[in-house]
């Protein structure tokens, strides 16, 4: 490490290591108290947080951020209330540290336990969502990890205001303030330093667009939990209930278009098309969605002809690709080719078809008759999430407090010696 960013990384890294050592055995009650106090602080400082966010929104407009990015950046009283609720929800979760995952006895007389332990120091690099400051800080604290947060330049002031509330919570509970640190500069050199900080950071979690996540995955020397894109599919099977399908498809695409769980591709079984016609496409068009369709679907008035590049694309906008497929196997083949292993949903009343879809796809989250917008740790009962992991090592799907633990073996003998 060299330069100012390197010096800052060393200072923050050492402080995080010291804090992590203390958090590893911190009582559950103190961690809970810190999170409850942080929630109270966020609520008490709502006006200051909104003022900080207004500065960030001005900065975002000057940078020409897309509507989806501006939506991610925006805070309002309802979203601040949701941040408080998320903090309290994480506080109420069972403490994941110290859980006995398995235990057994050996003929040698040894008693062996596998026990959940914190990972150590987590680095989180994120873009425009200031709420990640609270979510990531809360989940890391709950799981006994110290965290170094590097928010995006566009959310600099909002993240700083929320971080001050998190520190207030730590202070109130008598926990080390370095347990939750926020990089205090927009210097992009700190991203590089975090990716190289093998002596200080145990895992990196990126939250942001394809450019950020791709950079992290390509450059990191530290292990990474991440998903590159949320290319989520909804498949309307021939045995789908049409009214359920209409509700789910609209919600999956239009509830919030800028999140990774938004549907980006609609696959319609030809049998559904033969029975119910263009109802799903017409609903989307009526809601203001640009439907990029091919084949018979492209003849529906109001659609736009799809190009090959529209499939396997994350729009994060009021745009969806649509294609007819031949049954569940056609849907499976399409998703295997174009999906990103994030979230897929099948709409069907046929148990055998649903079982085939679940069995033959390997995305981190598979759903039946439910909107892909539920791909969220809070909706899974985790209180919040630090991200969605689509890799196959350690964590998959929503990464909550439990997924931010590892384990160690505790072995007890009685003067026991190996023969």
Image: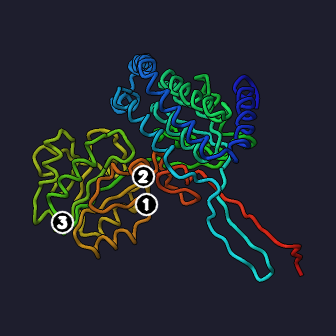
| Side of 371 where 110 appears, left or right | right
Coordinates of residue 55 in the picture (x, y in percent): 44, 16
**Mark 2–mark 3 distance (CA, rounded to whole Å):** 36 Å
Does 180 sit left or right of 136 as displayed?
Answer: right
Q: Mark 1 to mark 2: distance in Å?
A: 20 Å
- The answer to whether 73 is drawn above or below residue 91 in the figure is above
Q: Residues within 10 Å of mark 1 (few under 14, many from 20)?
A: many
Q: Nearer the viewer, mark 2 or mark 3?
A: 2
Q: Are marks 1 and 3 in contact (CB under 8 Å)?
A: no
Callout 1: SS:
loop
| Res 270 label | 3
Q: How far apart are the alpha carbons under marks 1 and 3?
A: 24 Å
Residue 381 image label? 2
For marks 1 and 2, the one nearer the N-term is 1
Front position in the image: 322 or 52: 52
Mark 2 / mark 3, whichever is N-terminal: 3
Residue located at (37% from left, 68% from top): 358
Residue at 35% across, 58% down: 344
In the rendered view of the protein, which quadrant contains the C terminus? bottom right
Q: Which mark is residue 363?
A: 1
Q: Quadrant of residue 288?
A: top left
Q: In percent of the image, x 35 and y 26: which residue is there?
A: 76
Residue 221 shows up from this direction: no
Instruction: Say few, some or many: other residues with alpha carbon within 10 Å of mark 2 (under 14 / 14 to 19 / 20 or more).
Output: few
Q: Closest to the observer: 173 or 215?
A: 173
Q: Position of residue 180 (x, y in %)?
A: 62, 34
Q: Position of residue 270 (x, y in %)?
A: 18, 66
Query: Colour scheme of this structure image?
Result: rainbow
Mark 1 vs 3, N-terminal side: 3
Q: Is residue 258 above or below residue 388?
A: above
The answer to whether the residues at label 2 and label 3 have Cβ atoms under 8 Å apart is: no
């Amino acid at each position: 490490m060299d330069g100012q960013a390197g010096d800052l990384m060393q200072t923050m890294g050492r402080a995080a290591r010291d804090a992590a050592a203390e958090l590893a055995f911190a009582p559950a009650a103190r961690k809970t108290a810190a999170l409850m106090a942080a929630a109270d602080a966020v609520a008490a400082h709502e006006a200051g947080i909104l003022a900080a966010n207004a500065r960030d929104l001005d900065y975002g407009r000057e940078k020409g951020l897309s509507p989806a990015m501006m939506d991610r950046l925006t805070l309002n009283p309802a979203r601040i209330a949701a941040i408080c609720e998320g903090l309290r929800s994480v506080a109420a979760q069972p403490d994941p540290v110290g859980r006995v995952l398995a235990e057994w006895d050996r003929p040698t007389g040894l008693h062996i336990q596998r026990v959940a332990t914190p990972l150590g120091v987590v680095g989180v690099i994120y873009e425009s969502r200031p709420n990640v400051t609270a979510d990531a800080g809360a989940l890391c604290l709950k799981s006994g990890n110290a965290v170094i947060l590097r928010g995006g330049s566009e959310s600099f002031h909002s993240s700083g205001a929320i971080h001050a509330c998190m520190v207030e919570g730590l202070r109130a509970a008598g926990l080390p303030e370095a347990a939750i640190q926020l990089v205090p500069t927009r210097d992009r050199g700190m991203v590089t330093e975090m990716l190289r900080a093998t002596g200080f950071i145990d895992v990196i979690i990126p939250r942001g667009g394809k450019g950020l996540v791709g950079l992290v995955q390509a450059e990191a020397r530290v292990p990474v939990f991440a998903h590159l894109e949320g290319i989520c599919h909804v498949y309307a099977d021939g045995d789908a209930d049409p009214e359920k399908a209409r509700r789910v498809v609209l919600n999956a695409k239009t509830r919030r278009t800028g999140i990774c769980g938004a549907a980006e591709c609609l696959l319609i079984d030809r049998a559904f098309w033969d029975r119910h016609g263009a109802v799903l496409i017409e609903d989307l068009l009526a809601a203001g969605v640009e439907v990029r369709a091919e084949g018979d679907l492209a003849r529906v008035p109001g659609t736009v002809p799809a190009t090959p590049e529209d499939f396997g694309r994350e729009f994060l906008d009021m745009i969806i690709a649509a294609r007819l497929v031949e049954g569940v196997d056609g849907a499976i083949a399409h998703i295997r080719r174009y999906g990103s292993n994030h979230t897929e949903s099948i709409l069907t009343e046929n148990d055998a078809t649903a079982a085939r879809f679940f069995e033959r796809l390997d995305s981190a989250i598979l759903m039946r008759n439910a909107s892909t917008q539920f791909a969220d740790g809070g909706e899974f009962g985790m209180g919040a999430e630090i991200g969605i992991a689509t890799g196959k090592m350690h964590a998959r799907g929503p990464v909550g407090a439990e997924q931010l633990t590892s384990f160690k073996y505790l072995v007890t003998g009685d003067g026991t010696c190996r023969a």
